[in-house]
Image (spheres, coloured by chain):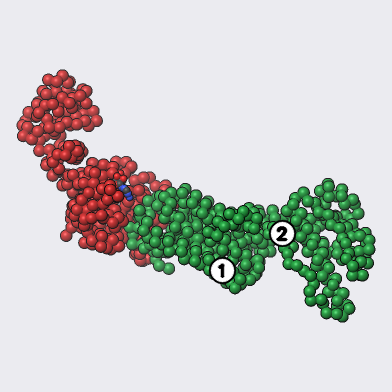
Amino acid sequence: MDAIAVEGLVKRFGTFVAVDGISFAVPEGSVFGLLGANGAGKSTAIRMLCGLLEPSSGRASVAGIDVAADPEGVKRSIGYMSQRFSLYEDLTVIENIRFFAGLYAISRRKVETEAERVLALIGLAGREGSLAGELPGGFKQRLALGCALLHAPKVLFLDEPTAGVDPLARRRFWDIIYEVADSGSTVLVTTHYLDEAEYCATVTLMHAGRIVAKGSPAGLKAERFPGAMLEVDCDRPAEAIAALAADGRIEEASLFGSRLHAALAPGLGDREDAEETVRAALAAAGFAVRSVERIPPSLEDVFIRVISESAKGGPL
Amino acid sequence: MNGRVGALVRKEFRHISRDPGTLGALLVVPLFLLAMFGWAISLDVNDVPLLVRDLDHTAESRALTAAFFSSGRFSRMDDGRDAGEALDSGRAAATLELPRGFARSLGRGETAAVQVLVDGSDATRAATVIGYVEGIVMRFGAERITLKAAKAGVALPSALDTRPRVLFNQDLRSVNNLVPGLVAIILIISAVISTALAVVREKELGSMEQLVVSPVESWELVAGKTLPYATIGLISAALVLGAGFLLFGVTVKGSILELAFMTTLFVFACLSLGILISTAAPTQQVAFLASAMLTLLPTFLLSGFVFPIRNMPPIIQAITWLFPTKYYIEILQALLLKGVGIGSYWRSALALLVYALAAASIASVRFARSRGR
Ligand SMILES: Nc1ncnc2c1ncn2[C@@H]1O[C@H](COP(=O)(O)OP(=O)(O)OP(=O)(O)O)[C@@H](O)[C@H]1O
Ligand SMILES: [Mg+2]
């Protein structure tokens, strides 16, 4: 059974449609990523799933419970880490944990063992007495995660849990997410970081309230970039994009740092001389090419393509 | 106590204990205000330097002089100097002159004149001193009459002409009158302002959403937020009453039970107002401003700290009807100062009850609706 099932979910604020009929399903025990730019509607979607916001229309069930019919039932089976929240900074680690244990009415006897389990999981054992406000950012976020895990929720919603922390801390955080999923919980996580999306079993890209792409990271890449993807290092890369776009064999080119990513039209990419094709095209236009390498497309490539296609009203 | 409410209450007390500012504002500032205003008021009405010129030198004249000093309000200056000079130089604040023949006039049942001069440069102080003088002289006169009546073996004339009037402190400023106002201010600060701030802080922090997504119910959240501040408010009010007694001898003349009951009712009204404000205020700043304007300011005006209530412009007096403080202060004055029971203040109690119920219903509807948004 799916831990989360969403069908045609809509949220309107007045005339503004924040979430515009999204549908997806998340199998039990998997990690599901919800991606999208600022204002795409991710938080709004999560808040409907948590029973915080009433959907305008559509259906959603979480852990087998209908969100609109029994929001209180949903609340008991989920953990939620909201985008803005990072604990009570004037309370210590263990006080924060005990407080949330109290909210979920975890019995006194069980609190200490649960606290120990969670502290070990989030790697904060031995720091029980530190004030939450004095912890480094990454630790704070892990503590917030720990507090959301105390009652062993079936489904865990994490809204941009790693915003603003360093890459190492993000990595550590994702290790914990995996452990949680391995223990059987389902995790829905939103993020801005596309490298993090690679860790998810399934990712969904939201844009202006709609889902514009959905699948496994590998599947999405294969689907959107059947042709090869080349990374080009040349001079005047911004102008080179225009030159490549004019060449019919290049489907799309975009700038990544000082380099170009060029996607070749399907069919062409399989040929051994794809690199030569690009090199020749650029040389003909008068650009000095330093290197051309075949690379696997990143999710970023995928999403840039998807968003620009949906902006053009192209196929989704 | 319900486990979830317990968790919320413990957490709130932790916040309070880690924030010296809050605790100071709630517990120390009221005592400070009481001490400061209390002493400022009681200092200028005690130990009034009084110069006595007793030209009569009789037992009667000495008795009246003694009555002045045994009141504790006056301190004695050397006799005999020039009264005008003593007043002008400020060494004496009042002079008492007993003319020759004072005892004789009294003995004949005539009106005996005494002259009292009071330094009028501080009008408030002068009015207070005149009040003292009148009180002492009047009591002295009454005692004489009783004495004479007993000697003559006649019944005391039933209608001794004593018109009731405010003898001491005619503008009602005194420590006695400060205490009710101060108690109301304390309760307003902790029950309205602190509560509103505590709820809005969770909204600002984003933790409100975290609370709402837990299985905590609305009433539990409200109870967890309000009980700590109600407790602190009541403790602080008790401290002020205790300090009022220890420092200034202010006692609760009426029933303590009624006082506790009425105070609980007022606190309930205040907490409802606090929650109501928290549902409308997006930030702590707005919450503070709103609660200060809507509750603290009127309370301050009504407390008698700034000006006596009866001297307030009618428009302000009318506005005060809109706030629960007015009713509570009336009740406090009845219970603390007059020592009368519910029979005499039931109108205020009823108004307070209606106010509390109305505020609580609006607050609970709005709170349930605004949760998490
Ligand atoms: N309560 C509300 N009333 C009106 N509009 C809202 C409300 N909540 C969100 N919106 C709007 O809905 C849109 C989607 O917001 P949402 O917070 O879901 O985006 P998001 O994808 O989470 O963005 P971010 O990455 O910035 O967190 C935004 O344009 C936002 O302004
Ligand atoms: Mg968001």
Left or right: B77 with respect to A78? Answer: right
Asked which secondary structure carries label 2, the reply is: loop
The chain under label 2 reads B
Along the line of sight, which residue is nearer the eye, B265 or A47? B265
Amino acid type shown at disc 1: Arg
Q: Do labels 2 and 1 share a chain?
A: yes
What is the spatial separation of the Cα atoms under label 2 and label 1, in whole angstroms?
26 Å
Pointers 2 and 1 in contact (CB under 8 A)? no
Location of residue A243 in the rendering, given as x and y in whole percent from the top left corner: 15, 24
x and y, in percent, of residue B43 in the image: 72, 55
Q: Which residue lies furthest to the front in this view?
A: B314
**Can you identify the residue that label 1 sits on?**
B347
Mark 2 closeness class: few <14, some 14–19, many ≥20 residues within 10 Å: some
Question: Looking at the image, which residue is at 47% across and 48% down?
Answer: B285
Q: Is residue A119 left or right of residue A221?
A: right
Residue at left offset 53%, top offset 59%: B323
Question: Count of labels shown?
Answer: 2
Q: Residues within 10 Å of mark 1 (few under 14, many from 20)?
A: some
Q: In this view, does A204 lie above or below A5?
A: above
Question: Mark 2 highlights which residue?
Answer: B170
